[in-house]
Amino acid sequence: MFAHSTSPKMLVSIRVAIIVPLGAAMLLALAAATPARALERRACANCPTMAVAPAGSFRMGKTVNRGYGDIDGPTHTVRFKRPFALAIHEVTLGAFRAFVRDTGYVSEGKCNVYDAGTSWFIDPRRNWADPGFPQADDHPVVCVSWRDAQAYIAWLNRETGRRYRLPSEAEYEYAAVSAGLGDPKAGGAITHDIANIGKVECCGGEVGGADTWLHTAPVGSFRADRHGLRDLHGNVWEWQQDCHHDDYLGGPNDGSARESCPKPGRRAVRGGSYGDAADYLSPRFRLGGPEDEGYFTVGFRIAGPAD
């Protein structure tokens, strides 16, 4: 079950777009700016399409209290000495299926779901190939654990000769806070017109505006943010490399992942899903889950070096 969860809701060319590092004072001005045109180059036949963030700094985290103590702070400065890259969308069902066919990999198959009026529970009938709702190969894979994501990335690295990995929480937040994706007609909020999101009141998918999906949508169904990234908010939560911590005390300030787990085997997720709305879509909102379990609302995105 996700940390701090009191309800189910609580829970192949390479295109390089430059992500501009932002100071807090620039966010409102940049929200109205036009994103830079992506630069394009080909890396390898099987490489995912990436957006590159240059070295820079930002203010990460904000202390909040949602009824169980102060979490998600303190606000602190994170500096990236080197650029890094994020895939423009989540890993798809088709890509994960190709990995399984090539390697014979067998997931542990622990997929957490919820039904109306229930808390999270592992449904033995659900797995990445059958999460309980229809998916085409261009939808993000779900019901995959953090360990499944690591196995996929190890295979991708062998196939491509590159050094892909999961993003750190700092990398995700760095990109998300400067994305400029909010709907100007709704005061900058994430709405159905710009993302696949769910009900404001718990829980589940909801159709509205440009969002015609109760569950996952094909990756890239909504417009890209100023960095060229898609679905950074909504569609599916995304596993991060980090262990899950309630706060950032003692954490790194160089953008790297926290690999020391206060609760063994608990990893962070970010971004919200097709079943979430409101605060869950905040670029600073974070939850945690067991690394050997999947969720029908959780997938993952690739990160890596900028070269």
Image (tube, helix red, strand yellow):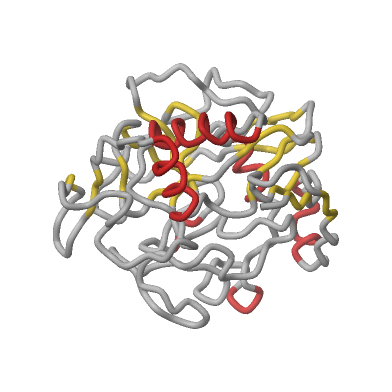
48 or 34, which lies in front? 48
259 or 73, which lies in front? 259
The answer to whether 191 appears left or right of 116 in the picture is: right
**Do we see residue 279 in this rendering?**
no
Q: What percent of the width, then of the height, locates residue 126?
A: 22, 52
Above or below, comparing residue 142 to residue 169 in the picture = below
Q: In which quarter of the image is the N terminus?
A: top left
Above or below, comparing residue 140 to residue 268 in the picture = below
40 or 293, which lies in front? 40
The answer to whether 215 appears left or right of 137 in the picture is: left
Q: Which residue is drawn at 28% across and 64% down?
A: 203
Q: In which quarter of the image is the C terminus?
A: top right
Above or below, comparing residue 160 to residue 8 in the picture = above
Q: Which residue is drawn at 30% across and 36% down?
A: 106
Q: Residue at x 18, y 45 (%)?
A: 122
Q: What percent of the width, then of the height, locates residue 92?
A: 49, 54
Number of marks drawn: 0
Q: What percent of the width, then of the height, locates residue 86?
A: 65, 44
| Quarter of image, res 167 | top right
**Do we see residue 93 in this rendering?**
yes
Q: What percent of the width, then of the height, locates residue 299?
A: 43, 48
